[in-house]
Image (spheres, grey):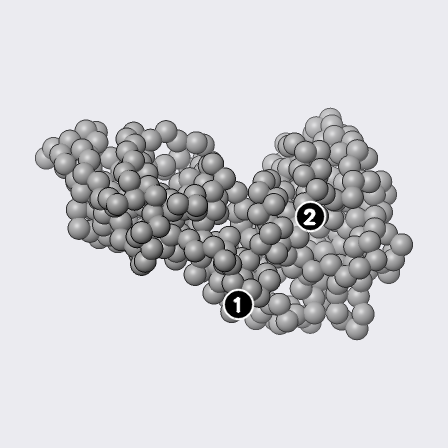
Amino acid sequence: MRKKQPNQSAKVYIDERDGHYKVVRNGVPYDIRGAGGYSHFRELRDAGGNTLRTWDTTNLAQILDSAQRHDLAVIVGLPLPNSGDIPFYTNPQITKTRYSALQSVIKRYRNHPAVLMWCLGNELDFPYKWTYGNFYDSFNALTDMIHREDPDHPVTTTVLNFNKKYIFNILLRCDIDVISFNIFSNLPLLRNDLDDLAWLWKGPYMLLEWGINGPWKGTEQTAWGAYIEDTSKKKAEIYQEQYQRYMPLEDPRFLGACIFFWGNKQETTHTWFSIFDENGNASEAVGTMQRLWTGKPSPVIYPEVKYMLLNGQGARDNVLLNPAVPASAEVLLFKGHDRIRSIRWQVFREDWYRKNGINSTRKLMPVATAENSGQNLRLTFPTPKEEGPYRIFATIYDNEGNFASCNTPFYVVGAP
């Protein structure tokens, strides 16, 4: 871990004074108010954000140019296989090729004014065993190269949650400028975790992913193992609570955080982490972040879903339906019925694809779709003919195009 005095002539550096850390960009202190994603630059700026975090270099030139036009900075993700990919790190040709590729990226973009930092890898494991020596050799060769080719921008990496063993190994065996964490359900533990390790490490840190709980262990499931997703209204409330109660804004070591996910992505469902829909419309989370980042309420009034009922039951009721029979779905709102323009209904097969236990990001096609006017928040539809797990989604749009979303998993039972 780097303990050198910062180069105060660099375009971006991390300054430390009496245990207080601060990112300095172009000579001015820079508080990171960030989001993870690749798009919606104007919306991020208008909400009070100033930083975009990416995970790879796809379309990097376009992203950096767009960020610059919207007065945003970018933490550029440099993809790297995890330490457990032993064949990658024991093959000299592969590591040499990756080294050359990343070196070309650094040389090409190091002078772009939108670059804030480089993030080498995402949620890497930093095991203690010396059998991972080739991983550390490759990782350190890359960080040395980045520092040499671009002394103007710091280097970070991310680990999942607050893993004390990984932090220790980074301090002992690596040379980065700042440690970053991806923390979701464990965010309430962060302050205590930091205090417990203060005897060893008092350096700066960032959160490069934070937000709602995902479709993983610890999240509520149906009897058949389908994860239960909160409504967009509930998600907005969770973002606010997590930020106000658990984000360590008062910590002099804390440099900032990036909400996940500032865009639209498939991860078990197409709505779970998506703050925007596939057409770029915004959900209530945008207004929530504007209030948190600026201290001023958003002027936008978003649709507010209370819950969905399927044959009079909710997601936690383990809804079982017979095949090819009429079913009834209904969405209930808190308020604003007169502002609703339309509601889109979609039925999908449940996405249970879990390669290596990782949530699938493959785009799914609905098995049924319908659309109602805003005056009708109910739908009668025939259940699928084939036995198995499904999920029905409702996306509610207001007259300005803002949306709310909810869904209910159900299981079509076969003949006895």
Q: Is residue 387 above or below residue 338?
A: above
Q: Quadrant of the N terminus?
A: bottom right
* Residue sitting nearer the eye, 393 or 332: 332
Residue 8 in view (yes/no): yes
Q: Residue at x 74, y 44 (%)?
A: 115
Q: Residue at x 52, y 47 (%)?
A: 261
Residue 394 locus on image (x, y percent): 32, 43
Q: Quadrant of residue 54?
A: top right
Query: In front: mark 1 or mark 2?
Result: 2
- Residue type at tag 1: Gln
Residue 214 locus on image (x, y percent): 44, 50
Q: CA distance from mark 1 to mark 2?
A: 24 Å
| Left or right relative to 315: residue 18 | right
| Left or right relative to 295: residue 415 | left
Residue 249 locus on image (x, y percent): 62, 67
Give the crowd class for mark 1: few <14, some 14-19, many >=20 residues within 10 Å.
few
Tag of residue 72 = 2
Q: Quadrant of the C terminus?
A: top left
Q: Residue at x 67, y 39 (%)?
A: 66
Give the mark, 1 or 2, whose residue is nearer the N terminus. Answer: 2
- Residue type at tag 2: Leu
Q: Secondary structure at mark 2?
A: loop
Give the crowd class for mark 2: few <14, some 14-19, many >=20 residues within 10 Å.
many
Tag of residue 367 = none
Tag of residue 244 = 1
Q: Is residue 333 above or below residue 99?
A: below
Q: Residue at x 64, y 47 (%)?
A: 52
Q: Secondary structure at mark 1?
A: helix
